Amino acid sequence: MLRNAFEPWHLILILAVLVLLFGSQKLPDMARGLGRSMRILKSEAKALKDEAPAEPPRQGSTGAH
């Protein structure tokens, strides 16, 4: 069904709409901000992963039936 859902002409169309909406001056700033956000998200996700306890919590009864 979605075999060829995202083709190269879709990217061209999306880029053209972005240029029309925001102008070519704003696009580099937006891309830079998106890159910073992605780096922050990646570092926070890594920090959460490193904080996880070494032993996973046990499954089963807790004694309160």
Image (spheres, rainbow, N blue to C red):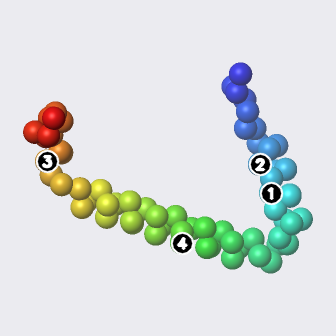
Disc 1 to disc 4, C-alpha distance: 20 Å
Sequence-first disc among 3 and 2: 2
Q: Earlier in the sequence, mark 2 or mark 4?
A: 2
15 displayed left or right of 39 = right
Residue 36's spot in the image, x, y percent?
54, 72
The numbered mark, 1 or 4, whose residue comes first in the sequence reads 1
Name the residue tied to disc 2: 11
Task: Determine contact: label 4, label 3, CB under 8 Å.
Answer: no
Q: State the image quarter where residue 53 is shown.
A: bottom left
Q: Earlier in the sequence, mark 1 or mark 3?
A: 1
Residue toward you, 62 or 46: 62
| Rendered residue at 89%/65% (across/down) | 20
Identify whether 56 is placed above or below 41. above
In the rendered structure, find residue 36 and report the number of the disc placed on it. Answer: 4
SS for callout 3: loop
Above-or-below relation of 2 to 26: above
Name the amino acid type tagged 4: Arg
Mark toward the start of the polypeptide (4 vs 3): 4
Badge 1 amino acid: Leu
The residue tagged 3 is 55
